Image: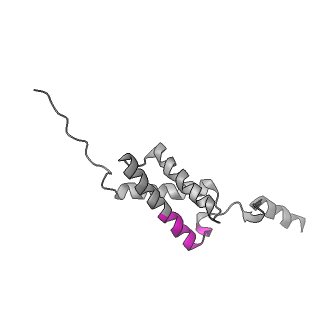
Amino acid sequence: MELQYNDLMKNHKIVDGKLLQTNKKWSQLKNSQRMWISEQIRLAHIEYVEQHNRLPMKKSKHKVLSVVWDRIQEREIWIPYYEYEINAGKMIDRLNRKSPLFNTPPPPLKLDK
């Protein structure tokens, strides 16, 4: 009995009076939760592109991730940040590749004559 309790406490944590699984994987989220997060990532990506007129790459990708992470914290969805970061980062990369701004050639250089 003691062994089961120790395993439970290693994989669970009491957050706001609720016992939550701390090692939850992305695949263990409900489909509706994953779809909601995907939609929030898409919306945050669009907002970022409209505000900055460029795609969120590398360091700026974390700005989009943090905006969506704050929205997730307002809901009753619990997933470790590193698990969220991996999957959400892949989604942002896919959105970037689909964007018309991706691989846009730079404007031609003007040569003075």
In the drawing, does residue 105 fall left or right of residue 22? Answer: left
**Residue 105: x, y in percent?**
25, 45
Q: Main secondary structure of the magenta part?
A: helix
Q: Residue furthest right?
A: 2
The magenta segment is 27-39
Q: Is residue 61 above or below residue 77?
A: above
Q: Is residue 19 left or right of residue 107?
A: right
User: Of 43 and 13, which appears nearest the observer?
Assistant: 43
Q: Residue furthest bottom?
A: 31
Q: Please check the rendered image and state whether residue 28 is part of the magenta-colored stretch, yes or no.
A: yes
Residue 31: image quadrant is: bottom right
Q: Residue 52 in the image: state x and y as whole percent.
A: 39, 46
Scheme of colours in the image: one colour
Q: Quadrant of the C terminus?
A: top left
At 31% across and 51% down in the image, what residue appears? 101
Quarter assignment of residue 111: top left
Q: Position of residue 70 (x, y in %)?
A: 58, 55
Of residues 112 and 102, which is closer to you in this image? Answer: 112
Please identify the quarter of the rendering in which residue 1 is found: bottom right
Point 41% across, 58% down: residue:
94
Q: Percent from the top left, x then y, of residue 33?
A: 57, 69
Number of marks in picture: 0
The residue lying at 42 percent from left, 51 percent from top is 48
**Residue occupying the far left of the picture:** 113
Asked whether 35 falls inside the magenta stretch, the response is yes
* Rendered residue at 34%/56% (across/down): 99
